[in-house]
Image (cartoon, rainbow, N blue to C red):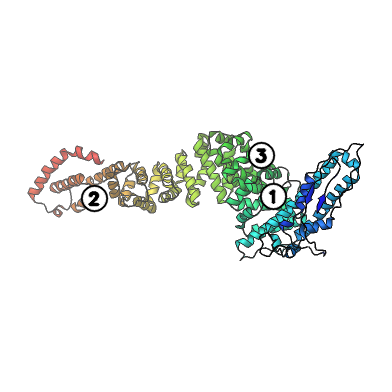
């Protein structure tokens, strides 16, 4: 049998073959197979129709062959019973049983729409045969045929999607039940495919229910995002963000995209590659407040990957983000400035920031933004200030340093304090102006002192770095003397990298005045920490650091400082480090040796106490002290003459040796002074 689609004498007859099948007369809709999709023939027929004009002298076209009814078309399309075909049961082309397709709500919704489109197509064909004026109006008729063809193609696409998804093989309902906690990957994958089938085929109600179920799945099972990006149609989900969609559908789709962008690398890459940035930026620019907030959240998540951040400028996104920072809600501002921070990590994008005056917007958020916005704004300023002097100068010119100092004094949030300190550190490292300002700011120095003593490891590290870069006056050094104990303790820390060096540099700076040196040696814990770090057996620290501190303690020539260092046991460690040629160790040894020799020469005690003193000296001085003590005993200068027990001859020899040693004294001693 053929479906005859002749419209006039000038039109070629298109005859679409349709294989004979038994048609059920009952209202029950039968089983669907790909073989039964004869609708494709009808669609291809309508899409290839051409209209030719009829001359007035021509005879009217013959009546069309009777068309099969729409009821027959529908049943031939989807209602053949595979059990009544003539194919054997094991034939590979025999349609498979689809036991639940008649229960599927999507198909129940799709079939009436399909039937309506078929009726319109049949009506158009009948009218074209009955009314010659329609044939003469070629453009109008061709337009109607194109519209009808598009509708039928859409239905065919939906049916194809429904078949490929596999949902016709399962029992489904309007409201889907979430997979259980013990559901395997295959079950969740089927659930996701069913959701996206409803999204693409169903009406508003189906789409909303599907999106709600999808968001529930994503929020309750964060790891399911990767499976959604793999099994679902992310591109179609992004298409739902366009302004021509229903507002509720658009909002729910935006929630899903935001979660996918935030869930992990694979799902974030998926939404980015499917082109989500453009729709998201358009929503951020012109959407309602709720949509702007969710859009900003998604953009921040997407730009967290530096490979994605550069694409923002292609859509003019920097201007949109800065405008959101200026006038958005607190939540929108926080996410927008987070995107600015992410983009600022891309070196090529910083030029756009300079052109769009991003620094002013960031400083404004330091003053009036939410706590989260202030933190991210300070972080952005740190990144920009670290990139070069141009941004540092711009930050200072717009009052950024003063804003950072105020925020440092007001905030107790450790994250904000850390990011503010990083921004200040970057400014002091790149420009002399903030260094001179901060060096004379006593309140700021006191804050640094407190942070070094009580802050987190990160804030201690940053504070020590800032302190080491400042040229502090003597009065201010006396003011922050209380942090020296914390600095010597930080010298013992192996992490983070650079902490020991920064703590050493800061401590040496504070020890440049005598009052601080005396205060340091009076603290037994600090002194013992220094001596332990001087021990060559202690390999946890580079020895040049504690040697530098010991040299700073001895720099003023204070007798009490030297005695306390010697009494704490620093001498043998310094002597060993000198032999190991550690930088600064020889100089420290000379200072300690000169002091010890002077104390021996001025001793008025008995011989035993003098011998105990010289035994601790290196060998050349050891010999000289021995001779000197014997000489003093022989001349009666020392008390306890009988303590030595030396004979007269021995004393005479000691005098001779003493003269010889004194003669070479100035060749030996200078090496130890």
Vertical placement of 402 versus 644: above or below? Answer: above
Q: Position of residue 382 (x, y in %)?
A: 55, 41
Q: Which of the marked residues, 2 or 1, is nearer the chain's N terminus?
A: 1
Mark 1–mark 3 Cα distance, whole angstroms, equals: 20 Å
Q: How many marks?
A: 3
Q: Residues within 10 Å of mark 1 (few under 14, many from 20)?
A: some
Q: Position of residue 45 (x, y in %)?
A: 78, 47
Q: Which of the marked residues, 2 or 3, is nearer the chain's N terminus?
A: 3
Q: Is residue 246 visible?
A: no
Q: Quadrant of residue 59?
A: top right
Q: Residues within 10 Å of mark 2 (few under 14, many from 20)?
A: few
Q: Quadrant of residue 349?
A: top right
- Front residue (pair 444, 86): 86
Residue at mark 1:
236
Residue at mark 2:
616
Mark 2–mark 1 Cα distance, whole angstroms, equals: 86 Å
- Front residue (pair 498, 609): 498
Disc 3 element: helix
Disc 1 element: helix
Q: In this rendering, which labeled residue sits more in front, label 2 or label 1?
A: 1
Residue at mark 3:
315
Left or right, residue 93 beside residue 522: right
């Amino acid at each position: 049998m053929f479906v005859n689609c002749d419209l006039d004498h000038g039109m070629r007859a298109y005859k679409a073959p349709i294989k004979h099948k038994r048609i059920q007369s009952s209202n029950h809709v039968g089983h669907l197979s790909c073989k039964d999709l004869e609708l494709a023939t009808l669609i291809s027929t309508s899409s290839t129709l051409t209209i030719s004009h009829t001359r007035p002298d021509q005879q009217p076209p013959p009546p069309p062959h009777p068309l099969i009814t729409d009821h027959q078309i529908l049943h031939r399309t989807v209602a053949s019973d595979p059990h009544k075909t003539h194919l054997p049961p094991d034939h590979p082309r025999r349609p498979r049983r689809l036991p639940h397709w008649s229960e599927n709500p999507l198909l129940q919704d799709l079939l009436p729409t399909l039937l309506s489109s078929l009726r319109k197509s049949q009506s158009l064909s009948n009218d074209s045969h009955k009314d010659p004026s329609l044939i003469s109006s070629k453009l109008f008729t061709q337009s109607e045929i194109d519209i009808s063809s598009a509708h039928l193609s859409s239905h065919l696409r939906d049916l194809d999607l429904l078949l490929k998804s596999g949902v016709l093989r399962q029992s489904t309902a309007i409201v889907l039940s979430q997979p259980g906690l013990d559901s395997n990957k295959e079950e969740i994958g089927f659930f996701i495919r069913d959701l996206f089938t409803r999204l693409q085929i169903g009406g508003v109600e189906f789409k909303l229910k599907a999106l709600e179920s999808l968001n529930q799945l994503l929020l309750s099972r964060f790891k399911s995002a990767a499976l959604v990006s793999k099994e679902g149609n992310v591109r179609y989900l992004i298409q739902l963000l366009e302004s021509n969609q229903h507002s509720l559908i658009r909002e729910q789709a935006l929630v899903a995209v935001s979660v996918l962008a935030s869930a992990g690398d694979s799902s974030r890459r998926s939404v980015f590659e499917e082109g989500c940035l453009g729709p998201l930026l358009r929503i951020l620019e012109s959407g309602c407040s709720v949509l702007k907030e969710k859009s900003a959240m998604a953009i921040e998540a997407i730009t967290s990957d530096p490979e994605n951040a550069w694409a923002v400028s292609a859509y003019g996104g920097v201007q949109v983000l800065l405008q959101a920072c200026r006038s958005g809600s607190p939540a929108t501002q926080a996410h927008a400035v987070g995107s600015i921070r992410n983009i600022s990590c891309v070196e090529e994008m910083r030029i756009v920031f300079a052109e769009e005056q991003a620094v002013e917007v960031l400083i404004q958020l330091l003053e009036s933004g939410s706590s989260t916005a202030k933190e991210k704004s300070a972080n952005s300023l740190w990144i920009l200030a670290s990139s070069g002097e141009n941004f540092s100068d711009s930050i200072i010119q717009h009052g950024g340093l003063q804003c950072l100092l105020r925020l440092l004094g007001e905030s107790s949030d450790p994250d904000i304090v850390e990011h503010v300190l990083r921004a200040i550190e970057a400014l002091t490292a790149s420009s002399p102006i903030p260094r001179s300002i901060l060096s004379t700011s006593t309140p700021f120095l006191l804050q640094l002192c407190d942070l070094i003593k009580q802050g987190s490891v990160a804030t201690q590290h940053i504070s020590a770095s800032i302190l080491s870069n400042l040229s502090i006056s003597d009065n201010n050094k006396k003011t922050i003397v209380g942090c020296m104990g914390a600095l010597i303790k930080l010298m013992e820390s192996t992490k983070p990298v650079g902490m020991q060096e920064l703590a050493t540099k800061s401590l040496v700076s504070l020890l440049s005045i005598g009052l601080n040196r005396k205060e340091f040696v009076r603290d037994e814990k600090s002194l013992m920490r220094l001596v332990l770090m001087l021990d060559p057996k202690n390999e946890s620290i580079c020895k040049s650091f504690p040697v530098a501190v010991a040299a700073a303690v001895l720099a003023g020539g204070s007798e009490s400082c030297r005695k306390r260092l010697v009494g704490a046991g620093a001498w043998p460690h310094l002597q060993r480090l000198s032999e190991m040629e550690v930088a600064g160790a020889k100089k420290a040894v000379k200072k300690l040796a000169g002091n010890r020799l002077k104390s021996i020469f001025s001793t008025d005690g008995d011989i035993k106490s003098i011998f105990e003193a010289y035994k601790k000296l290196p060998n050349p001085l050891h010999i000289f002290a021995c001779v000197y003590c014997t000489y003093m005993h022989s001349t009666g200068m020392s008390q306890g003459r009988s303590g030595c027990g030396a004979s007269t001859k021995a004393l005479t020899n000691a005098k001779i040796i003493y003269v010889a040693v004194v003669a070479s004294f100035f060749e030996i001693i200078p090496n130890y002074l």
